[in-house]
């Protein structure tokens, strides 16, 4: 973590290690209550949503006890299901950015909410590279893969949009200009897809299983598929007015 442990909680009250689990549960419960009210959900509807997800033990009465503080423990499974019903990421219930400046992330250890969230997600402070082979390094690999996938999807969609716009134009000179611009976008899409394919191969070489690709990028993993043919469609036959 990023600060030295001390004996005060986020509100300046001395806490013992034995009190921390109940304090953490109450903290999560407040976030759940706020998310429930923001979504306009009654406790009964939340309980029904939990039952629909296979957790009928999260009853309306259990929710009342949780929000009132009578229930002082919460399982990880409960947290995940409740977050899904409430439509919020589970991590925002643990570390509510924007509403709390600090949290007691461990018994007697108060840090900024952002630092707590970064610790939970495997981040490191800026300027601290992840040691090779560490869990953080693996997380960074998958984050980079996610960035490359998003870039490839965006590039392909832009290329398709530009070519459609060019093909829908009747003005001869404008059409030529738009086709040239589309070709540039298609070249970028090709490069992005090729980079994604190379990175996925590197992941496999490190014995890391790459995540499944979106259906529109399935061809990236096909060794027999020519990425260039996918991302650089053949231009349509010339129109009579282009002759």
Image (tube, grey):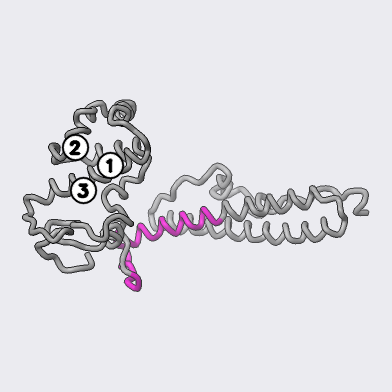
Decide if residue 3 is in sight here. Answer: yes
Callout 2: SS: helix
Q: Nearer the viewer, residue 207 or 5?
A: 5
State the separation of the CA atoms marked 2 and 1: 9 Å
Q: Which residue is mark 3?
A: 27
Residues at discs 2 and 1 in contact (Cβ within 8 Å): yes
User: In the rendered view, would you say 8 is above or below 44?
Assistant: below
Q: Which residue is mark 1?
A: 32
State the separation of the CA atoms marked 3 and 1: 9 Å
Residue 142 occupies quadrant:
bottom left
Q: Badge 1, how many Cα within 10 Å: few under 14, some, many 20+?
A: many
What residue appears at the point 37 percent right and 38 percent down from the top-left corner? 39
Which of the two discs, 2 and 3, labels the residue nearer the N terminus? 3
Callout 3: SS: helix
What residue appears at the point 73 percent right and 52 percent down from the top-left corner? 163
Does residue 142 belong to the magenta stretch?
yes
Residues shaded magenta: 126-151
Q: Which residue is mark 2?
A: 66
Decide if residue 197 is in sight here. Answer: no
Q: Is residue 160 left or right of residue 219?
A: right
Q: What's the magenta bit mostly, secondary-structure-wise?
A: helix
Residue 73 occupies quadrant:
top left
Residue 203 image position (x, y, % from top left):
43, 56
What residue appears at the point 84 percent right and 48 percent down from the top-left corner? 237
Residue 115 occupies quadrant:
bottom left
Residue 27 image position (x, y, % from top left):
21, 48
Residues at discs 2 and 3 in contact (Cβ within 8 Å): no
Q: Nearer the viewer, residue 106 or 234?
A: 106
What residue appears at the point 18 percent right and 59 percent down from the top-left corner? 10
Q: Is residue 121 left or right of residue 218?
A: left
Which of the two discs, 3 and 1, labels the residue nearer the N terminus? 3
Residue 60 image position (x, y, % from top left):
23, 28
């Amino acid at each position: 973590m990023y600060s030295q442990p001390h004996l005060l909680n986020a509100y300046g009250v001395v806490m013992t290690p034995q009190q921390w689990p109940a304090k953490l549960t109450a903290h999560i419960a407040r976030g759940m209550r706020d998310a429930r009210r923001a979504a306009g959900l009654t406790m009964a509807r939340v309980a029904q949503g939990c039952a629909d997800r296979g957790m009928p033990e999260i009853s309306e009465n259990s929710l009342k006890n949780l929000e009132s503080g009578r229930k002082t423990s919460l399982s990880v499974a409960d947290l995940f299901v409740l977050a899904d019903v409430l439509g919020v990421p589970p991590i925002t219930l643990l570390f509510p950015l924007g509403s709390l400046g600090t949290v007691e992330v461990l018994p007697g250890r108060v840090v900024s909410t952002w630092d707590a969230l970064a610790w939970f997600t495997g981040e490191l402070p800026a300027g601290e590279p992840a040691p090779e082979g560490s869990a953080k390094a693996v997380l960074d690999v998958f984050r980079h893969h996610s960035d490359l996938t998003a870039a490839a999807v965006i590039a392909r969609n832009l290329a398709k949009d530009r070519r459609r716009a060019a093909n829908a134009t009747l003005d001869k000179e404008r059409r030529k200009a738009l086709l040239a611009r589309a070709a540039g976008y298609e070249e970028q899409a090709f490069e992005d897809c090729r980079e994604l394919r190379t990175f996925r191969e590197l992941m496999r070489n490190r014995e890391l299983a790459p995540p499944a690709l979106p259906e529109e990028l399935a061809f990236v993993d096909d060794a027999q598929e020519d990425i260039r043919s996918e991302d650089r469609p053949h231009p349509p036959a010339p129109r009579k007015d282009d002759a």
